[in-house]
Image (spheres, rainbow, N blue to C red):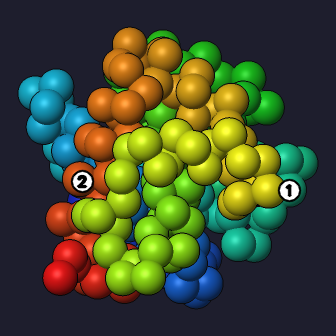
Amino acid sequence: MSQTPTREDAWALLTEYTDNPSLIKHALGVEAAMRAYARSYDEDEEMWATIGLIHDFDYQQNPTEETHLHVGTGILRERGWPEEWVRIVASHADYMGVPRDSRAAKTLFAVDELSGFLTACALVRPDKAIAEVKVKSVKKKLKDKAFARGVNRDDVRVGAEQLEVDLGEHIEFVRDAMATISDQLELPPPE
């Protein structure tokens, strides 16, 4: 890839390896959160959003720690994606051993687990509206280990700490970013 990857490149890569609707919606949620944080930090929105969109592109086919991201980063490198982007993608999983030494890497880690958790919180609401998910409710559900048990609560907490953002403000920020694409997430807008 001789030029900077575009969203279209990322979408093509994601959909080449992923057809699970939940995983695609997760990628879209992370993309929206990354874009919003990039805007708030005056960083490169397209770069951050594109990284968010591809961060788990290989997960459906490689769902274990032994394969996820090991395979994906290899594919990104083979296809000529920028090494900085590959490192940011790799850094969102502790087991890859890639330090989160940039704001983009810290942000990807911080929004990844939280975006999935927020979707789960919206889906148990009668109206399923992500914009109506309350921060207090999310914090309460984070303490309930039986709810959305696949979500790593420590990653949610540590992610906010690494961004040096209050957890409640972080939850609100990511929720609001995801609410801007509620139609793509198939979560209805508020009544």
Does residue 67 appear anywhere in the picture? no
| Residue 34 locus on image (x, y percent) | 31, 45
Q: Classify 161 as above or below 186.
A: above
Determine the image quadrant of residue 169.
top left
Residue that mark 1 sits on = 64
The numbered mark at residue 177 is: 2
Callouts 1 and 2 close, C-beta under 8 Å: no
| Residue 79 locus on image (x, y percent) | 50, 57
Dot 1 or dot 2: first in sequence order is: 1
Amino acid, disc 1: Thr
Question: Where is the N terminus found, in terms of image quarters?
Answer: bottom left
Does residue 136 appear anywhere in the picture? yes
Question: Where is the C terminus found, in terms of image quarters?
Answer: bottom left
Foreground residue among 84 and 186: 186
Q: Is residue 132 left or right of residue 53?
A: left
Foreground residue among 79 and 48: 48
| Residue 155 locus on image (x, y percent) | 64, 32
Instruction: Determine the residue positioned at 46% across, 74% down.
Output: 125
Instruction: Determine the residue positioned at 65% across, 23% down.
Output: 98
Amino acid, disc 2: Ala
Q: Residues within 10 Å of mark 1 (few under 14, many from 20)?
A: few
